[in-house]
Image (cartoon, rainbow, N blue to C red):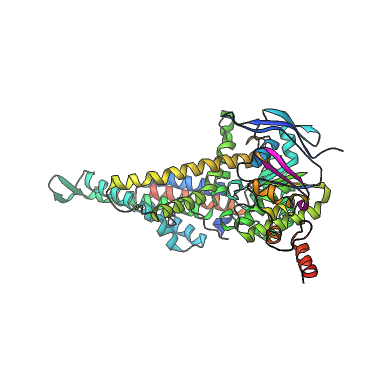
Amino acid sequence: MGNIMIGRFVPGKSVVHQLDPRTKIIGTFVFILLMLWANTWSTYLVAAIFVWFTILLTQQPLKMYIDGLKPIFWLLAFTIVLQIFFTGGTPVLLHFGFIKVTLPGVINALFVMFRFVLIILMSTIMTLTTPPTSIANALESLLKPLKSLKVPVAEMALMLSIALRFVPLLMDETQKIMNAQKSRGMSFSTGGPVKRAKAIVPLLIPLFVGALQRALDLANAMEVRGFKDAEHRTKYRILKYKKQDYQAFASLLLFSIIFFSVLYLI
Amino acid sequence: MENAIKINNLTYQYQNQTTLFQDFNLTIDPGQWVALVGHNGSGKSTLAKLIMGLLTPTQGGITVFNQVLSESTVNDVRSQIGMVFQNPDNQFVGATVADDVAFGLENNEIDTKLMPKMIAKTLEIVGMSEYQDREPHTLSGGQKQRVALASVLALQPKIIILDEATAMLDPEGRQAVMATLTQLKEQFGDALTLVTITHDMDEAALADRVVVINDGQLILDGTPAQVFSEADVLHHNGLGLPFSGEVVAHLNQKPQKYLNESELISWLSTSNK
């Protein structure tokens, strides 16, 4: 349960940690957009160098990023196989009955793999260096224009940050219930898929009941501390772009220029 | 003199028509430390929720500092009362200690610039200053409850209600919270009214006044010494005695009245050679 790397925050004092969360969200978003454009070897090289540079700036061990890639390994393998086997074209490299492996297929598969890996690495950089509540806070700030369309942005951000706050608690509780059931002879890891699925039911029910009880308690605690609605509140943490954010935006712009010149000129 | 809390002919019915309180009366004076004791299901937590306006009485009224609790005054009343609940995890709203204390301030639209000072001050009162940036899951239960107390204190309430706030804590955490409460009472004196809801009699012994309720009825009301001398009545209502009381119950030669721990120790060393 403890090895889920996606979305985990690791505290630190690096330059990337100190960036405004909005800078990191915008940066990641722009990077993903650019990666959808990339279709030559040199563009991937430029992007890889950019990601490598950012990873170095976070001052986190490389192992953390490799761990971050593990959960998507099977998805990645599946996509690559699909690309290799079902992309047409010439020259044909291998022939197994009705399946043909073509050179464009292999190149496409490699591109898709690089694209996936680079996007995941970039998102991992963001989540690794930004506390979840800061992400919620930044989203609220970035989505503020939607308020005029009557989208309850403040409520949604508060809900998100409270949900994130309860994740470790519910993980803990799941583990406790599992241990309680195991100690009474329940097995979660043996038997066929049907038996395993059935074993989940006595785990989910107490978990849901517990979560609902927590929600009611939390609602009381919030009300008692004067919570009326998410609109009429001041904010303790106010986001402010600093010098390093402008530097980050400048390097993002520089990267985009190099990326496009490589894409169209080489 | 105005009362801190005045409960007048209160009747409360659950939605399934079970009546819990019937013509219940209780007055709490400003500056008092009242322990509300009763066994599980005696109605003590329901009473706290009624006072906070989280539940609405079927009949009768609740007055907090001369303000009658109603739908239009509930926010004013709540701004005068702080409440700490039983489960330390389920009342921690913020992502860090400082954010949690800030939550109440944000709700009351306090200026952002004033917040850091207020947060630092209240955390200092409960002795949690160095934990300001810690996340809740790295704190012990007792520390979380002290943060909850700080969150409540930041709003400068006149009354603090603790609803079984130490029930889920280990002995060490319990002691730390009780010590914080005693210190608070000393610091704020008559400006702070404390209501501790508990079934731990050692905790109740710290209060100025002990009120025993069972099935929504007032059973005993008096100083700890008065209440704890009625051991039979307490046992009949599913409650025990504080430690010193239990010791006395096993003595052959008993003191004349209820003695607290330190009084009992000096009594034992002088009279019973």
Residue at image point 17% right, 47% down: A100
Locate the C terminus of chain B by quadrant.
Answer: bottom right
Q: Is residue B180 found left or right of A196 in the rendered image?
A: right
Most common secondary structure along the magenta stretch = strand
Q: Is residue A84 above or below residue A60?
A: above
Q: Tell me the quarter of the image containing the N terminus of chain B.
A: top right
Extent of the magenta region: B209-225
Q: Nearer the viewer, residue A166 or B37?
A: B37
Task: Say above or below: B221 vs B145.
Answer: above
Q: Quadrant of residue B219?
A: top right
Give how far across and how far down residue A81 sits, in percent.
Answer: 25, 49
Q: Of residues B110 and A36, which is closer to you in this image?
A: B110
Image-quadrant location for residue A151: top right
Is A252 on the left-hand or right-hand side of A229?
A: left
Drawn side of residue A159 relative to residue B6, left or right:
left
Residue that sits furthest to the bottom in the current view: B273
Q: Is residue A42 inside the magenta stretch?
A: no
Q: Is residue B210 magenta?
A: yes
Query: What is the x, y in percent for residue A244?
Result: 59, 54
Q: Where is residue B131 shown, x and y percent of the image?
A: 65, 58
Can you name the residue that lies furthest to the right here? B1
Out of B8 and A199, give the one closest to the viewer: B8
